[in-house]
C-alpha cells in the first residue's frame, strides 16, 4: 500500500471505474489461497539465510551468480518506475498542498533526503538476516497513519460533504460504477500482476521473507492483511465520485485524496492526507532501496571484488568495508535512477500505469521462482533463458514505450515497428489485435518466459549442484541433509580471519570460540564438515548464499570431496536416506525412552522399598500405642483393687497413646485430602511475623534440648498475608523440627530469612548440618520415603509431603534448594492466596 495505492487507486477508479478493485484482489488471493507458497518461501529463507529474491533464485539453481546478477539487474530496472512513482506522488502532493511550482527540484530534494535516511538507518549492520526492527516499526506506524488518513478523508466526503452513501452514489457517473467490463481480460491481467507483486517485488520479498522473525506470523497475515486492504479500498470510489463532482474538469484524479479536502476548506484534513501519502511513499522507497542495495552489493559488487582478488586469499581483505560502501553507493544509485526516470518521463504518466509497468518487470522472475520451488527438473539454463526472454519482451513492449519516444525507441518505431515491419510493433506483436498495451505485454512477456523456461528445462539436464539444491528446496519441510563440498584440511587460521573480515571481529571470534567449546577443544575448532557448513551459513547471512559459497570455495582451494559421486546417486537414494533418517530418529527416541524407563524403574524400586519400610513403620507406630491401650484397658477391665494414683497413671497412658495414634491417622488422612484438593482452608489476614513466632515457640523446647540457636530478622518478617495461619505454621514447625532432629550439627543453628517482592514472599529455613545427599533429594517429598538419617528417628516420612501439599493448596510452593553448608528449604507464597484473590 504505497502511494500507488494511496493516491493511484482513487485515480484508477476515476479513470476506469471498478477496475481499482483488482489492486486489492490479487494480494488478497495470495494471502488467502497461496498461503502455503508464502510459508515455503519463509521456511527456505530462514533455513538457508536468504538475503534477497536474487539470492533465493541463484541458490536454488546451483548457487549461480550469473542468475543472481540477472535477477538483480531486472529488479533494479523493474523497480525504477516504482520509485519514480513515489517521487512523482510526493512531488504532486507537495505542489498541490503548498502551491509550489518547482516540481523537478522538489523531486530531487525528496530523493536526496530519502537516500540519506536510508543510508543512515538501513546500513548499520551487514547481516541481512539481522532484522531492521526500527525500519519495520516505522513501516508499521506509517501503515496506521495512511489508513487513518484515507478513512478520515472518506468519512469526511461521505458524511461531511454529502449526505451519506446513497447521496454520493447518486452523483456518480453511471460509467464509473458499471460492471460491464468486470472480469474481462484486463481484470484478469491486473489481478495477476497485483498477486505476483506480493511475491516478486524485492521490497515485498524483503519484508515477507527476510524481515520475518516468526513463520507463524503468516497465519495472522492471512486474515489481517486482506482486512487491511479492505479498509484501504473502502472509500476509494466515494472519493473518486466526490472529486469528479466537486473539482473542475481536468483536475488530476491521482490527487483527489488531497484536493477534495482542500476544495472544501478543510486544510487540517488535507494536511493529514498529505502526511498519509508522504508516509506511503517514503516507506516503500526506504525498504526497496535496502533490498536492492543488498542485492547489488552481494551479487554484483562482491563477486567482481572476488574476481579481482582471485590471486590472494579473501581472508586478507576487509570485506565489511567493501560491502558497506557498495550498499551505500547502491542506495544512492537506486534513488538516482528513480529520479532520472521521473525527469525523462516528465512526471505526467498516471500513477497506476507506472506501478503496473514495474509490476510486470519484476514478475519476469515468477516462472523461475515457482518452478524452482515445486519442479525438480527445473534447470539453471531454463531459468536464465526464461528470464532473459521475458525481460527483453517486457522492455520492448511496455517499459521503453512508456517514455513516449524519448528513450531508445522513437515514436516512429513505436507506431510503425522497427524498419517499418508492422508485425514487430512493440504494442501489437504479430498483429494479434490485443488492444490494451498492458494485457498485450503480459501475454507476450510472461507467456514466452514460461514457455521458454519449460521447454529448456525439458531438454537440459541440471548439474549435480542444481539437483542437490533442488532436493533441498523441494524437501525444505522434511529433514535437510547438509551440503558437502569443502575440504577439511583448510587452515583454521585463514577461516577465522575470513570470518572476522565479513562478520566483524567480535562476532567471528565468538563463533569460533563457541564451536571449539562445543567440540571440547581449547583454542581453535577442528574444521569438521558441520563447522564448515555452519560458517558458510553465517557468511551467507551477510553476503548471500551464492557469494558465501564462492568465498569458502576460494578460501579452501575449491575442492569438493566425493561430491559428484554423491549427487550421481542422490535421486535414487533420496528415499532410502530419508527412511534411514526416520529410523535414526526413532532409534534415538526409543533409546531416550528406554533410559527414562530405567530411571523410572530405579526410582520405583527405591519407592517400593520405602513403601515397605513405611508400612512397617506405620504398623509399628500403630501397634505400639494399641498394645499399651489394650494392656492397660484389660487391667482396668479386670476390676482389680488399684490405688487412685495407679488408676490415674493407667488412664493417662491410655489417653496419651490414643492422642499419638490419632495424630498418625490424622497425618495420613490430611495428606490424602490435600492431594485430592478437599482440604478446607481458613484464609484471613495475618502477619508473617506472628506465624514465625508461633512456630519458633512450639519448637522452643526441642531447640533448648538440642542446644540450638534460631536466628531471625523480625523486621523482614513484618509482612501482611492473606493465608491460613495454622497451616502455614504447621509447615514451619515441621521444617524447624526436621532441622533440629536430623540436621546432624554438634551446635545446631537455624537461620530463618524472609524476602518480599512483586506480591510474593520467599522464606528460607536453613540449618548448618550435613545437608541432604544428592541421590536422596528426589525422594524427600515422596510419601513413603525416609532418609537414612531418619530410619531410627521415629519418623513416618509424612512431614515433608504434607508440608508440600499445604503450600500447594495455599497457592505457593515448597522445594529443597540445597546450600553451601547444611540443608535449605524454600517456601514461596503469594501475599494474597489465589483463593482470596478470586473472592475479591
Image: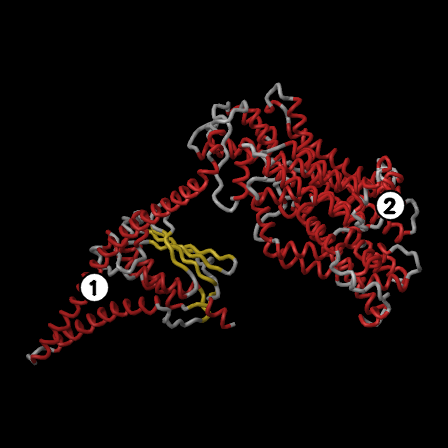
Question: Is residue 769 in sight in this rendering?
Answer: no
Name which residue lies at 77% across and 57% down: 20
The percent position of residue 200, horizontal first and vertical second, equals 68, 45
Of 399 and 708, nearer the camera is: 399
Local SS, label 1: helix
Residue 435 to residue 796: above or below:
above
The CA span between labels 2 and 1 is 96 Å
Q: Are marks 2 and 1 in contact (CB under 8 Å)?
A: no
Q: Nearer the viewer, mark 2 or mark 1?
A: 2
For label 2, the residue is 347
**Residue 653, image quadrant:** bottom left
The percent position of residue 684, horizontal first and vertical second, equals 45, 71
For label 1, the residue is 618
Badge 2: few (under 14), some or many (20 or more) residues near its Cα, within 10 Å? many
Local SS, label 2: loop
Of 241 and 96, nearer the camera is: 241
Amino acid at each position: 500500500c504505497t502511494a500507488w495505492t494511496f493516491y493511484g487507486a482513487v485515480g484508477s477508479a476515476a479513470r476506469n471505474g471498478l477496475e481499482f478493485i483488482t489492486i486489492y484482489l490479487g494480494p488478497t488471493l495470495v494471502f488467502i489461497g497461496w498461503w502455503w507458497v508464502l510459508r515455503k518461501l519463509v521456511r527456505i529463507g530462514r533455513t538457508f539465510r536468504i538475503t534477497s529474491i536474487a539470492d533465493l533464485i541463484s541458490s536454488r539453481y546451483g548457487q549461480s551468480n550469473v542468475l543472481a546478477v540477472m535477477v538483480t539487474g531486472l529488479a533494479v530496472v523493474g523497480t525504477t518506475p516504482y520509485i519514480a512513482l513515489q517521487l512523482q506522488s510526493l512531488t504532486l502532493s507537495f505542489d498541490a498542498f503548498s502551491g509550489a511550482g518547482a516540481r523537478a527540484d522538489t523531486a530531487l530534494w525528496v530523493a536526496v533526503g530519502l537516500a540519506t535516511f536510508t543510508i543512515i538507518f538501513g546500513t548499520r549492520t551487514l547481516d541481512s538476516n539481522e532484522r531492521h526492527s526500527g525500519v519495520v516499526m516505522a513501516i508499521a506506524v506509517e501503515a496506521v497513519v495512511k489508513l487513518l488518513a484515507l478513512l478520515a478523508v472518506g468519512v469526511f466526503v461521505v458524511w461531511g460533504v454529502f449526505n451519506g452513501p446513497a447521496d454520493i452514489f447518486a452523483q456518480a457517473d453511471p460509467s464509473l460504477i458499471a460492471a460491464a467490463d468486470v472480469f474481462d481480460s484486463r481484470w484478469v491481467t491486473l489481478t495477476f500482476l497485483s498477486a505476483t507483486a506480493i511475491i516478486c517485488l524485492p521490497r515485498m520479498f524483503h519484508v515477507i521473507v527476510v524481515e520475518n522473525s516468526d513463520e507463524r506470523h503468516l497465519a495472522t497475515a492471512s486474515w489481517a492483511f486482506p482486512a487491511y486492504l479492505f479498509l484501504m479500498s473502502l472509500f476509494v470510489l466515494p472519493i473518486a465520485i466526490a472529486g469528479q463532482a466537486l473539482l473542475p474538469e481536468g483536475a488530476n484524479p491521482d490527487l483527489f485524496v488531497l484536493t477534495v479536502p482542500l476544495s472544501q476548506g478543510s486544510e487540517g484534513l488535507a494536511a493529514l492526507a498529505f502526511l498519509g501519502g508522504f508516509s506511503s511513499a517514503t516507506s516503500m522507497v526506504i525498504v526497496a532501496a535496502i533490498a536492492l542495495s543488498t542485492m547489488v552489493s552481494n551479487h554484483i559488487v562482491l563477486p567482481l571484488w572476488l574476481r579481482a582478488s582471485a590471486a590472494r586469499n579473501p581472508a586478507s581483505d576487509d570485506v565489511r568495508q567493501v560491502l558497506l560502501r557498495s550498499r551505500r553507493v547502491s542506495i544512492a544509485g537506486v534513488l538516482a535512477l528513480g529520479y532520472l526516470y521521473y525527469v525523462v518521463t516528465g512526471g505526467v504518466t498516471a500513477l497506476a500505469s507506472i506501478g503496473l509497468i514495474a509490476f510486470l518487470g519484476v514478475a519476469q522472475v515468477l516462472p523461475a521462482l515457482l518452478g524452482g520451488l515445486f519442479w525438480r527438473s527445473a534447470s539453471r539454463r531454463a531459468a536464465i533463458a526464461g528470464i532473459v526472454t521475458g525481460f527483453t519482451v517486457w522492455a520492448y513492449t511496455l517499459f521503453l514505450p512508456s517514455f513516449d519516444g524519448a528513450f531508445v525507441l522513437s515514436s516512429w518505431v513505436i507506431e510503425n515497428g522497427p524498419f517499418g515491419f508492422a508485425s514487430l510493433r512493440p504494442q501489437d506483436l504479430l498483429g494479434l489485435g490485443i488492444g490494451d498495451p498492458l494485457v498485450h505485454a503480459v501475454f507476450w512477456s510472461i507467456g514466452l518466459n514460461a514457455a521458454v523456461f519449460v521447454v529448456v528445462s525439458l531438454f537440459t539436464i541440471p548439474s549435480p549442484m542444481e539437483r542437490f539444491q533442488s532436493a533441498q528446496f523441494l524437501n525444505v519441510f522434511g529433514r535437510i541433509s547438509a551440503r558437502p563440498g569443502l575440504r577439511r584440511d583448510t587452515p583454521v587460521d585463514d577461516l577465522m580471519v575470513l570470518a572476522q573480515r565479513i562478520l566483524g571481529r567480535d562476532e567471528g571470534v565468538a563463533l569460533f570460540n563457541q564451536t571449539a567449546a562445543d567440540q571440547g577443544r581449547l583454542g581453535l575448532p577442528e574444521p569438521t564438515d558441520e563447522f564448515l557448513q555452519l560458517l558458510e551459513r553465517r557468511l551467507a547471512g551477510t553476503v548471500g548464499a551464492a557469494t558465501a559459497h564462492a568465498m569458502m570455495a576460494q578460501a579452501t582451494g575449491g575442492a569438493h570431496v566425493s561430491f559428484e559421486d554423491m549427487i550421481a546417486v542422490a535421486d535414487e537414494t533420496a528415499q532410502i536416506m530419508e527412511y534411514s533418517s526416520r529410523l535414526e530418529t526413532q532409534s534415538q527416541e526409543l533409546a531416550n525412552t528406554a533410559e527414562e524407563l530405567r530411571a523410572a524403574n530405579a526410582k520405583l524400586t527405591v519407592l517400593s522399598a520405602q513403601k515397605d519400610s513405611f508400612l512397617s513403620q506405620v504398623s509399628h507406630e500403630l501397634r505400639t500405642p494399641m498394645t499399651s491401650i489394650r494392656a492397660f484397658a484389660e487391667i482396668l477391665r479386670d476390676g482389680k483393687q488399684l490405688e487412685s494414683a495407679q488408676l490415674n497413671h493407667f488412664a493417662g497412658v491410655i489417653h496419651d497413646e490414643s492422642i499419638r495414634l490419632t495424630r498418625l491417622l490424622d497425618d495420613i488422612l490430611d495428606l490424602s485430602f490435600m492431594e485430592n484438593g478437599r482440604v478446607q482452608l481458613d484464609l484471613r489476614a495475618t502477619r508473617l511475623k506472628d506465624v514465625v513466632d508461633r512456630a519458633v515457640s512450639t519448637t522452643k523446647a526441642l531447640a533448648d534440648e538440642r542446644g540450638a540457636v534460631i536466628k531471625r530478622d523480625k523486621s523482614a518478617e513484618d509482612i501482611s498475608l492473606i493465608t491460613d495461619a495454622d497451616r502455614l505454621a504447621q509447615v514451619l514447625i515441621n521444617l524447624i523440627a526436621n532441622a533440629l532432629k536430623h540436621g546432624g550439627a554438634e551446635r545446631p543453628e537455624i537461620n530463618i530469612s524472609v524476602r518480599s517482592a512483586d506480591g510474593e514472599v520467599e522464606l528460607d529455613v536453613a540449618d548448618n548440618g550435613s545437608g541432604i545427599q544428592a541421590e536422596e533429594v528426589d525422594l524427600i517429598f515422596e510419601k513413603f520415603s525416609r532418609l537414612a538419617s531418619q530410619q531410627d528417628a521415629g519418623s513416618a516420612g509424612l512431614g515433608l509431603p504434607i508440608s508440600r501439599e499445604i503450600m500447594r493448596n495455599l497457592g505457593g510452593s515448597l522445594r529443597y534448594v540445597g546450600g553451601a553448608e547444611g540443608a535449605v528449604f524454600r517456601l514461596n507464597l503469594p501475599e494474597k492466596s489465589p483463593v482470596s484473590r478470586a473472592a475479591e
